[in-house]
Amino acid sequence: MNDTAPINQPLGLPDNAPVADPADVEAFVALLAGQGWLKTPDILARRSGWSARYVRCLGNASAGRVISGTAGDAAGYRLTLEATLEEIQRCENSLLHRCAEMKRRVCEIRKVRCQRADAQSDLKEQILDAVFAPLA
């Protein structure tokens, strides 16, 4: 397991984000085979050296072979090919909802950043006016 990313992490991810080892992805898929839904503590009990964060990383790196869920019987991780269509759709909808929420948050943050940049620009102009006005 490579528990942390290289300094130049792709996609702007934090430098300490885990990076999935392809062999671990395959081990994760094999571990889930025929198990139904497995919760993170059950997975960690079977694989020493993995963390909950690394398990999420492996799910993300599974190329769609693993779905995740957070509700009731569909909590944890399951192989996509062994899941019901309803479970797959629930996972898809959850991911799309989180994506939309993150995009909304990015837009809100950018709006505040732009307001801040405008305010800083106005302040700079006021300072320059105050400094150079007596010289005119």
Image (cartoon, rainbow, N blue to C red):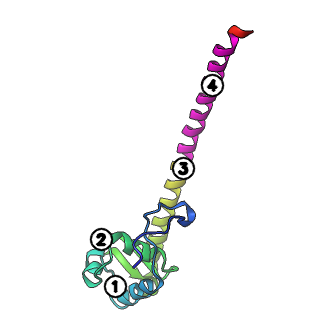
Q: Is 85 drawn above or below residue 53 in the view shown? A: below
Q: Earlier in the sequence, mark 3 or mark 4?
A: 3
Residue situated in front as seen by the camera: 83 or 23: 23
Please name the residue that numbered disc 2 is placed on.
Answer: 72
Rounded to the nearest angstrom, the CA distance separating label 2 from label 4 is 55 Å
Please name the residue that numbered disc 3 is placed on.
Answer: 106
Rounded to the nearest angstrom, the CA distance separating label 1 from label 2 is 13 Å
Instruction: Identify the amino acid type marked 3.
Output: Val
The question of residue 1 being in magenta is answered with no
Q: Where, by quadrant of the figure, is residue 116 drawn?
A: top right
Instruction: Bin the neighbour count of mark 4 within 10 Å (Cα to Cα): few under 14, some 14-19, many 20 and up.
Output: few
Instruction: Identify the amino acid type marked 2.
Output: Gly
Look at the numbered discs 3 and 4 and tell me whether their residues touch, using CB distance below 8 Å: no
The question of residue 111 being in magenta is answered with yes
For the residue labelled by badge 3, is the local secondary structure a helix, a strand or a loop? helix
For the residue labelled by badge 4, is the local secondary structure a helix, a strand or a loop? helix
